[in-house]
Image (tube, rainbow, N blue to C red):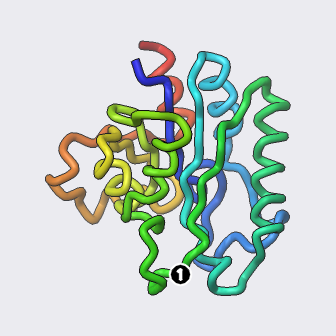
Amino acid sequence: MNNLIILDRDGVINEDSDAYIKTLDEWIPLPGSLEAIARLSRAGYTVVVATNQSGIARGYYDVATLNAMHQRLRELVAEQGGELGKVFYCPHGPDDGCDCRKPAPGLIDQIVTEYGDVTGAPLIGDSLRDLEAGLARGCKPVLVLTGKGEKTRDKGLPTSLGPVDIYDSLADFTDHLLKE
C-alpha cells in the first residue's frame, strides 16, 4: 500500500484568495484541516504538499515569507501531534514555461524523486489543474469542495480524469479514509 498523500495548499489546507495569500497573517487554516493532516500522519501516512505559488514570480511575496507560512503550518500540525512531510512549490508565473506549474507534473516528479512511486496515492486538490498534475503520474484524483472546489465540480470534471472521489473538505476525506 502506498502511504503517501499529496495535498494542494490554498483552498485545501488554508483559505484561498484570488488576491493571493501574501503574508503570514493572510495564511488562515481551513477548519479541521490541520487536525486532518495530524490524524493522517498519526495513522502512518506521509502527507506532502504540492502547490503553485506564482505570487513569488509576480512579486507579491518572497520565498522567506512562503517559508514562514510553511513553518507555521508545520508547527500547527505538530501541535496536533502530527508531522508534515516536504512542501514542494512552483515559484513560477503562468507564462514562464516551467515544468513544475500544475497542471504540468513537475512537482509530482519532485515528489517521486524524494519519496518514490506515487501510483495510486491520493492527490487532493480544489482545482482541475491539481487533479490533472497528479493523474499524469498515476495519482488518484480527489476533489474537495473547499476553496475553488465547488466551482471546479460545477464546471464538470472531464472524463479523462476517470472516477474522481469528491469530499466536502480535507477533514471529510480523512474521516472516510481512516474509517476504511
Residue 37 placement, left or right of 131: right
Write down the quadrant of residue 24 in the picture.
bottom right
Residue at x-position 51% and y-position 52%:
146
Residue 77 placement, left or right of 159: right
> For mark 1, does the 10 Å Cα neighbourhood hold few (<14), some (14 to 19), or many (20 or more) residues?
some
Residue 102 point in image, percent of width and height = 43, 64
Residue 134 placement, left or right of 43: left
Residue at x-position 51% and y-position 45%:
111
Residue 39 point in image, percent of width and height = 65, 23
| Residue at numbered disc 1 | 93
Residue at x-position 85% and y-position 31%:
79
Q: Secondary structure at mark 1?
A: loop
Residue at x-position 84% and y-position 64%:
25
Write down the quadrant of residue 98 in the picture.
bottom left
Is 32 in front, or is 163?
163
Residue 117 point in image, percent of width and height = 40, 34
